[in-house]
Image (tube, grey):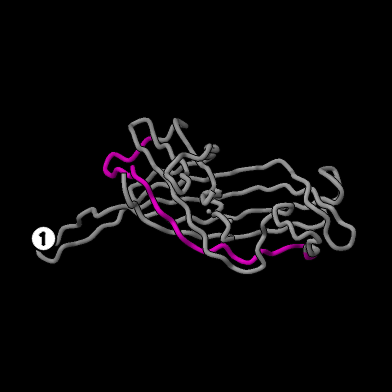
């Protein structure tokens, strides 16, 4: 859905803004509500939690040599575009200019009368960081799991007394897991750090 780091949803989407997409995996779009459009999301990326031990401090001033994990909560944003057809849904994340970011697969989807949800999983191969205190140099792998749920926004005008569809909303909940291995990809696991992220938003355009 990251710090200001992009969200894990855009990889989730300021670039987790995280790319995500799904198409044609046997899920039929709802016949009553069209969720197509562009959604803007905003939310909070929580404090990282590392276990069984804290991550040693970085020794280099060049922050690009390290995984961007913030010690404090941060605000994140994301943009998604949804396209709906009889065949199903296609969901992609967009960068700040509206261009599509290379999508990753949505593994599970749920369609219902109250909305539809999708589960996104992403695994990134390990990268080597710069040196840290204590003589450690870590290979870091990064995996993300995000649940998205789209729902209709309904109002009931006083005079008519009947519900009217006004738009669509989205809520996401996700976590990003970083595994730090000492000395290289096959080294012993030194610690694992998890960052949770929750975003919400609404459809802003087509």
Q: Is residue 20 above or below residue 180?
A: above
Disc 1 crowd rating (10 Å Cα; few below 14, some 14-19, many 20+) is few
Magenta span contains residue 25: no
Q: Is residue 15 visible?
A: yes
Q: Extreme front residue here? A: 61
Q: Extreme bottom residue here? A: 72
Q: Which residue is mark 1?
A: 160
Residue in the image at 79% along x and 58% along y:
191
Q: How many marks?
A: 1
Residue in the image at 36% along x and 55% along y:
202
| Percent coordinates x, y for residue 77 in the rendering | 48, 57
Q: Is residue 52 visible?
A: no
| Percent coordinates x, y for residue 73 in the rendering | 59, 68
Residue in the image at 67% along x and 56% along y:
68
Foreground: 152 or 79? 79
Q: Is residue 166 above or below residue 104?
A: below
- Quadrant housing the C terminus: top left
Foreground: 30 or 200? 200
Left or right: 98 as drawn, with respect to 7: left
Magenta span contains residue 32: yes
Question: What range is drawn magenta here?
Answer: 28-54
| Percent coordinates x, y for residue 22 in the rendering | 47, 36
Q: Secondary structure at mark 1?
A: loop
| Percent coordinates x, y for residue 158 in the rendering | 13, 66
């Amino acid at each position: 859905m990251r710090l200001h780091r992009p969200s894990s949803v855009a990889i989730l989407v300021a670039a987790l803004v995280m790319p995500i997409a799904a198409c044609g995996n046997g899920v039929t779009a709802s016949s009553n509500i069209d969720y197509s459009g562009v959604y803007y999301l905003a939310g909070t990326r929580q404090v990282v939690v590392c276990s069984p031990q804290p991550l040693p401090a970085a020794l280099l001033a060049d922050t690009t040599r390290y995984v961007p994990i913030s010690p404090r909560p941060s605000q994140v944003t994301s943009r998604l575009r949804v396209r709906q057809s009889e065949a199903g849904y296609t969901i992609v994340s967009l960068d700040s200019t509206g261009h599509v970011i290379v999508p990753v697969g949505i593994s599970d989807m749920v369609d219902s009368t109250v909305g539809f949800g999708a589960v996104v999983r992403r695994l990134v191969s390990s990268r080597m960081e710069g040196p840290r205190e204590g003589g450690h140099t870590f290979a870091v792998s990064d995996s993300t799991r995000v649940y998205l749920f789209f729902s209709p926004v309904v109002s009931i005008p006083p005079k008519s007394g009947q519900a009217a569809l006004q738009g669509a909303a989205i809520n996401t909940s996700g976590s990003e897991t970083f595994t730090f291995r000492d000395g290289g990809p096959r080294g012993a696991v030194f610690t694992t750090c998890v960052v949770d992220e929750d975003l919400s938003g609404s459809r802003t355009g087509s």
